[in-house]
Image (cartoon, coloured by chain):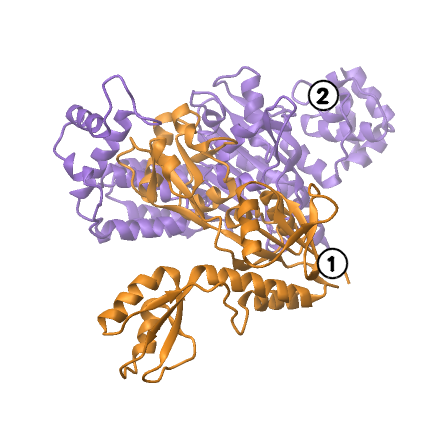
Amino acid sequence: MIKETNKIIDLLGGTGALAKLLSVNLSAVSNYRKKGFPARLHYKIASLCNDRGITVNKNIFGSASRNILPMDSRPIEVLSEVSINVMENLISEEFELIDPPVLVSADKVLDRLGENIADRLYIFSDPAGTRLCLRPDLTIPTCIHYLNSGFRGEKRNYAYHGKVFQFNSAISSEPNEFSQAGLESIGGDSSLDSEVEIFFRTYNSLRQAGIKKLNVLMGDVSLFSLLIDVLDIPVIWKDQLKTKFWNDKNFKSLLDELSIKKKFDNKLFYKISDLDQETAEIFVRDTIGLSEKQSPVGRSIKEITERLMKKSKEINTEPLSRSTANLIRDFLSISDTPSKAIKKLKSISKNIDSKLDSKIDIMNERVDKMMNLKIDLKDSIFSLEKGRTVEYYTGFLFDYSCPILGDKSNVGGGGRYDDLIKSVSSNVDIPAVGAALNLERIEKAISKESSS
Amino acid sequence: MKPLLLALPSKGRLHEQMNNFFSSSGLKLARSGGKRTYSGFIKDIEKIEILYLSASEISNELLRGNIHMGITGIDLIEESRTSASKELVMLSKLGFGKADVVVAVPNSWIDVENIKDLSEVASEFRSYNNRRMRVATKFTNITRNFFSKNGINNYRLVDSAGATEGAPAAGSSEIIVDITETGQTIEANNLKILKDGVMLKSESCIFSSVSKIWNEIDLGPVEKFLRIISARSEALNKAELYFDYIKEDSDLEIDLYRAFKAIFVKGSPELGESVSLILPLSEIASCSFHLTNAGYGPIRTNQPNFIYNRDSESWNLLKESIKKI
């Protein structure tokens, strides 16, 4: 392997020339001659060789980076300087570089993302009649790669880059295809460490690529659902509040609605209120007019009965108290630097439930871990509202923006999505956390920053 | 000067209804060449070239701005409209092809009566079954817009090419969104339309596209054509009502307008005169009762063939939209 490394150094012009190309000093390159190239340089070396038409034995890059593009027979991609810098800092021994599928099942994507995004997808049928979709991101294809590799819960760390496709309308100037680079950590335990690692690596690679002014916005949607879980309110309200959480307008009108005594038109809600589950199921069966062997279309007798019973409980419930409604509103309005936000959270939610307290402690721990990695969080914002507009993340989430880009300032983001693998295919719960960066936007931000 | 392109439905019920409408308007359609060609013209109106296309193709061509005017349903326009579509103007409703796009659920869903129930059930369905509730429809756009407006997000659309109303029973979907005139087919398939489940009231209309193709068009013949069309469609929905004005009642004019949208044809009446009102067809009975109760009678009614208003609304709409181009 060392022999191969030395051959490459020579082909690239020798120790001095390579030191210049990599902007490192001479002693570093002589070190490579003895110990091989460090993982963070694999990407760049491969690209340099590719540019110069040098054929390389890919074994020198170790297993993590083996399928780096130029070595295989697949088409050569041209990556810009900035993209290479970003990738260099994402790839390491721990993150295996993969090339996930471009074509994915349209049904899987729609099941995951919901119909609201359907008009931004490139959906078509192949000659066999299968409905396919050009990948709108690399997260779903990475999960498919994980499952196709036969893993069912084992921890795997992946890195990727490639084109993604989102229709941005004929009027908008946003491109319909752009490049993403990112990381996913799938399986294992849903630990804080993988969240912090993904955050740290993506944050770091943006910084190393040369972005000067970078805003970080963080949130954690699991806090809201835990708050709702521990509140003393009917289950059906909990379900409703959690469902409408993702749309602020609907959420506000639901809160208002729950705060006044409701009237129900459906007489069945009243009729069923005194029955136990079994009698209620018989009552429902009779009302529909089904024999014991028949079942209703689309939903089971149990499903229908349980909902009727939940509704009948709702009839006899007093409206949501003003203090609880205000608690929910105050909770969601928290938005501050991470440490101040945690302080506010603690004061709002003290004496509600110990589960909530320990969740907040975990958040605190996460922030501490980030600080220990010397991530500067002074200008970051932690907001309880973050993540509400896309029903996608299940816990911690973050995004990065470059103010110099104006309106479309987002350059990437990520977070935890523990239900992702489940919704893509498998029935087992496999935790996942990841992040993706928009390479073109990063490039634009860097060039704007340097020219201003 | 270029000819104006007007697209008309080429087949099916819409084609027949459109033909009846044109002949009752006194407009004679002729095909260029033979009976089987797909282009034609209107006798006695120059410079309008007719293209016969399917109703959904007419919607697409209008939204792309490729033709000047076309007759198609509101449902098809709303379904084909995307963020990339050109602006359209609805010049006039034509009074035929009326149908509703509705959302219907199985009769056995006795706990579901309105959209709000459906929204709750959709999210419960996902947690019970670990998949989204399926909606069979050929109106994917209309459904997405309506559901998103109503806060329903836990669902999946299933394309249905043929008989949508059969999908729940066949097990390929849980609920449906479909178009219906009377609701009978839906009922016959053990489905019920939700109380607030009418998503769109559709009807055949004449639309114009707001696009550069309107440059170099002679508007004279277009005005004539539009005035005829809208005079006829106005007459189809309105009726005329006569009675003898026998006692002083200064509030009568305003009362009848407020209650029945009835308009005196020549302003305030004078005692002893026979007067006439124009009002929506659906208000004829109530307005007549109102008048007989007030001591008037006999009330005579009549349905005109054409109502030419001084200002043609559809012509004004077209003029305004062309100015913007």
Under tag 1, what secondary structure? loop
| Residue contact at pointers 2 and 1, CB within 8 angstroms | no
Question: Color used for chain B?
Answer: orange
- The colour applied to the residues of chain A in this rendering is purple
**Residue A413, position in %: x, y?**
55, 41
Q: Relative to A2, is B148 on the left or the right?
A: left
Q: Which residue is mark 1?
A: B3
Relative to the observer, which residue lies in front, B249 or A135? B249
Q: Amino acid at mark 1?
A: Pro
Identify the secondary structure beneath mark 2. Answer: helix
Q: Position of residue B278 (x, y in %)?
A: 41, 69
Q: Position of residue A327 (x, y in %)?
A: 28, 50
Q: Amino acid at mark 2?
A: Phe
Q: Residue at x 60, y 25 (%)?
A: A95
Which quadrant of the figure has residue A279? top left
Position of B156 relative to B255 (above/below): above
User: How far across and down, in percent of the image, does residue A406 sit?
Assistant: 61, 56
Q: Residue at x 50, y 50 (%)?
A: A378
- Numbered mark located on residue A61 in the image: 2
- Which chain letter goes with mark 1? B
Position of the N terminus of chain B, as image quadrant, is bottom right
Q: Around disc 2, counting alpha carbons within 10 Å, would you say few (fewer than 14), some (14 to 19), or many (20 or more)? A: many
Tell me if residue B226 comes above or below residue A125 in the rendering.
Answer: below
* B322 to the left or right of B168: right
